[in-house]
Amino acid sequence: MDGCIFCRIAAGQVPANIIYRDDEVIAVEDLNPQAPSHALVLPLAHHATIVALTRAKPTLAARLMTVASQLGAERGGERGFRLVVNTGEYGGQTVDHVHVHVLAGRRMSWPPG
Ligand code: 5GP
Ligand code: ZN
């Protein structure tokens, strides 16, 4: 999708620190990390939200979560990690191309702000 920063990263038009790539999913380091380890897992194809993705392609949503949880397990180890999918205005979503945050390396608070 024109003008979407994550589509441009997926297409290699914008540089990013790519951790993982397969034919449908990539993982990159977040530009503005909120934890010692902060990665984003996203589909190469543009889907705006997790709601749109699960409606259009539930198997791709499952792959996204599979990659995210494996990355979290690698990075968080026994101490654990957090997966976050911000959705819409109240969910705090700022990039309208669905992505899973994988946060690790510190104790995280609950509930979120
Ligand atoms: P959201 O607020 O939509 O859940 O998360 C968007 C995330 O994308 C933020 O954590 C932000 O730091 C990250 N981000 C925004 N622009 C870029 C970019 O150009 N490259 C990378 N790697 N991350 C970005
Ligand atoms: Zn996009």
Image (spheres, rainbow, N blue to C red):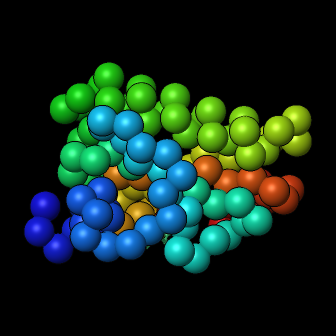
Res. 96 image quadrant? bottom left
Q: Is residue 30 visible?
A: yes
Res. 74 image quadrant? top right
Please name the residue shown 42% across and 29% down the image.
Answer: 63
Q: Is residue 51 visible?
A: no
Q: Measured along the vertical axis of the image, is residue 23 above or below residue 102? A: above
Q: Nearer the viewer, residue 14 or 60?
A: 14
Please name the residue shown 68% across and 54% down the image.
Answer: 103
Q: Give the residue at the far left of this rendering.
A: 2
Q: Measured along the vertical axis of the image, is residue 14 above or below residue 108? A: below
Give the x, y percent position of residue 53.
27, 38
Give the x, y percent position of residue 105.
81, 56
Q: Quadrant of the N terminus?
A: bottom left
Q: How many marks?
A: 0
Q: Is residue 5 left or right of residue 38?
A: left
Q: Is residue 55 left or right of residue 34?
A: left
Q: Measured along the vertical axis of the image, is residue 78 above or below residue 82? A: above
Give the x, y percent position of residue 23.
30, 35
Q: Nearer the viewer, residue 10 or 41?
A: 10
Please name the residue shown 24% across and 29% down the image.
Answer: 57
Please name the residue shown 64% across and 60% down the image.
Answer: 38
Q: Nearer the viewer, residue 29 or 90?
A: 29
Res. 43 image quadrant? top left
Q: Quadrant of the C terminus?
A: bottom right
Give the x, y percent position of residue 70.
62, 33
